[in-house]
Image: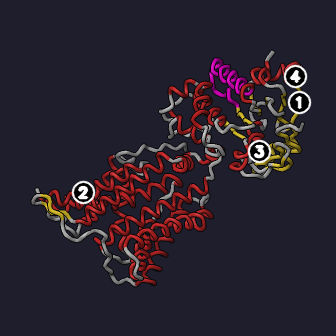
Amino acid sequence: MPPLLEALGLEARYGWTKVLHDLRFSVEEGGITTILGANGAGKTTTLRAVCGMVKTAGEIRFDGRRIDGKATEDLVRLGIAHAPEGRGTFVGLTVEENLRLGAYARKTKASIADDLDRIYQYFPVLLERRRQLGGTLSGGEQQMLAIARALILRPRLLLLDEPSLGLAPLVVREIFRIVRTINKEQGVSVLLVEQNASMALRLADHAYLLETGHVVMSGPSTEVGKDDSVRRAYLGY
Amino acid sequence: MEIFLQQVVSGLATGGIYGSLALSLVMIYQATDVVNFAQGEMAMFSTYLAWSLMNHGLSYWLAFALTVTVAFVGGLAIQRLIMRPVENAPILTIVIVTLGLLVIFNSVAGWIYSYIIQPFPSPFPTTAIRVGSVVFGPHDLGAIGVTLVLLILLYVFFRFTSLGLAMRAAAQNPASSRLVGIRVGWMLALGWGLAALVGAVAGMMVAPVIFLEPNMMSGILIYAFASATLGGFTSPGGAVLGGFLVGVIENLAGTYISFIGTDLKLTVALVLIILVLLVKPSGLFGRAVVRPV
């Protein structure tokens, strides 16, 4: 069976500067893949490349079909949801309106109310705050809102951009636990980019290591986690 | 007391019109950070369209319906064809483009319809309405009614429909909107269409009072600016309320402050703009915009 998402020879540039070089990675149907790397390695750009927010060269396939060069709005309709860098909260809209926007591109609108209930079960704090403006939420709550907004699309693939950034360790653990549950219960495949390598390696089944826009290592996460250089540079022991 | 009530009601009538036009300014300003200086002339042009439709024998309300439809499509087309190519240009460029549109609409209207002042019909009965000893103009009451219905429809649209929600989202956060599948460019165009529609209604409601001519909206636009500034350029509801306030203040000042009369009414709007900008630049209901430098 071909992977759900596959990138071959993927390149991206900002102006004259090439930031991704010949990337090759894939996400299996139902799997969790993580791309690790330091600041500036190109992790966010990789996600932006997948969902058509930067100009790219090379091939990206989703479900076997070429999607490179397509508009972001159309990729959403194929079932690719993105919880972006900076969380992308609609600060002037209520939490519930934020969530309803997540369902904007859905073909079946009928079961949105049920899905809202289900999302509120995963994220009870959003239920408490559903009439509040998005901008009044804490960082962790906004991260939950970003993931919830992506999930209500009923995506096949969830792109997660550094969900741990700026959050307390307990909150990070909670968010990773929810991502794992969603992956198991809903069968949503996940592509996670992270700086927090130890958390990401525990969650993912496959890992890629990105350094200045090149994939320098890849493999099952257990193996990548055992590698000496990864341990020293990213895990700190 | 009778004079006071009459002035308040007629102030509310014109105020509703200022508020509508202010609302169309604010709708575009919120979505694109651009003040559309051509908003008044677009409304004037729509009103001329209604006038010539009626001259060709159409009934008032049929002409009204056709005009708002054409205004909506026209506003949409202006955004797609004229504003979109410059959307990433510096703000001054975009302002100049809207000023260019103002001049074009004004002169084309003069060219087609001439600068001769024309009467424009009111759809409402002409017999004055008496409540006790107070006499109200039926057009005033009708204009207030039409304005309120329009505002309620817009409120329901933006508050309770998913398209309205998507338009608000696109105005606030275009990047995130694309990520949930909203076609942001079309939302901006829809915003222009709706603003033109609101402007067209305002034009047709004010024309029976100030008569039809290519420069009819220049004063109204200044009142609309005063309304939006008073209520807050970041608050649609505030802009409308600002409109009603400006309408009433203008009328009362004209009636009770002897040196103002009818000649200096427009000055009241300008004084209001300056006062608001001095005392509370974000307006009564707006929030101060903080931008990183």
Over which residues does the magenta segment extend?
A: A162-183
* Labels 2 and 4 touching (C-beta < 8 A): no
- On whether residue A173 falls in the magenta region, the answer is yes
How far apart are labels 3 and 2 at the CA level? Answer: 55 Å
Q: Secondary structure at mark 3?
A: helix
Query: Which residue position is annotated with label 3?
Result: A49
Quarter the C terminus of chain B occupies:
top right
Marks 3 and 4, how far apart at CA: 28 Å
Q: CA distance from mark 2 to mark 1?
A: 71 Å
Find residue A108 and report its image quarter. Answer: top right
Residue B262 is covered by the magenta coloring: no
Name the residue tied to disc 4.
Answer: A229
Which numbered tag is attached to residue A218?
A: 1
Which of pointers 3 and 1 lies earlier in the amino acid sequence?
3
Q: Look at the picture and state if A166 lies above or below B281.
A: above
**Image x and y of residue A175, in percent:** 66, 24
Provide the major secondary structure of the magenta segment.
helix
Q: Residue furthest front?
A: A110
- Marks 3 and 1: same chain? yes
Which of these two is toward me, A127 or A132? A127
